Amino acid sequence: MDVTIPGFRVPGRGSSRNVIGEYAVGDRGDGCLQILMAHTDSVPPGLGANDNASGVGVLVELGFRLRRLDPGCDLWLVATGAEERVVIGTGYHVGSAFLVKTVRKRGRRADLRWALSVDMVGRGKRFYLRSPRPRTRPGVEGRMLAAARRAKVTVRWARDSGDGNSDHREFELAGLPAAVIEVWRGYDPCHHQGCDRPGRLQARALRRVVRVASELVGSRPWG
Ligand SMILES: [Zn+2]
């Protein structure tokens, strides 16, 4: 993958960065682009294990499998900075807002099929897919739910309350299709607490989400 690390200003908090790994399929695709993103920051006293080393871990694992998965579209795997609004004090997720700008600046806005935030996926057998939409769209949530079915993982779609709370929010507000995959009901009792520690992560849960993501981006069946 080609890796770039664009930096950006965080209001009142100095600077941060996104790490973008780009996998280009060249002429094999029709110019389409897919984005998987996971935020790297956390909320003290939480240690950021489930929120969100779990999501970053899924992306790293996927990076190793891309050649075998043979994506049919260009794919960006993005570790975003400055997602946690309660820490930053902004009304928006600064890293993903900057990522939207990067997509635009590179002239890829029209190519983007979807962006999926992978956020708190380190526990459980079942997962939620959330987006700020009245109903699912075939090319976005529909595609993601179909990938989950192929991966034999239960994923239920739910509508975001309000305009969303994870990196997908900034894409949707910019008119770009996006969603978040997360723990069942979006609820982890250790969310932003000191107990969000690595020991609570479940390898099986992480493998389930890797399987869903593999089915989603790959042109070859996973297995
Ligand atoms: Zn998070």
Image: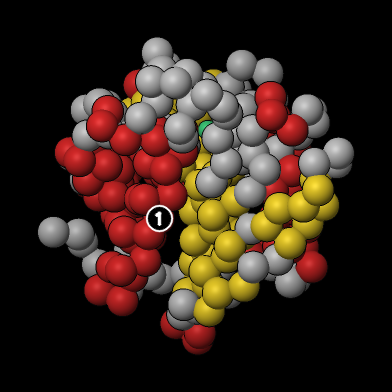
Task: Give 95 or 73, whichever is nearer the viewer.
Answer: 95
Residue 53 shown left or right of residue 203 in the figure: right
- Horizontal side of residue 223 vs 122, given as left or right: left
Please tell me which residue lies in front, 191 or 137. 191
Q: Is residue 94 left or right of residue 66?
A: right
- Is 82 drawn above or below residue 109 in the view shown? above
Identify the amino acid type marked 1. Leu
Q: Quadrant of residue 111?
A: bottom right
Label 1 C-beta lies within 8 Å of the nearest ligand 1 atom:
no
Q: Position of residue 176 (x, y in %)?
A: 68, 47
Judged from the image, the secondary structure of the residue bearing numbered disc 1 is: helix
- Corner quadrant of residue 190: top left
Residue at (21%, 61%) from the top-left corner?
221
Q: Is residue 85 visible?
A: yes
> What residue sits 62% from the left and 27% below the top?
165
- Which residue is tagged 1? 59
Q: Quadrant of residue 175?
A: top right
Could you tell me residue 6's position as x and y percent? 70, 66
Residue 152 point in image, percent of width and height: 18, 39
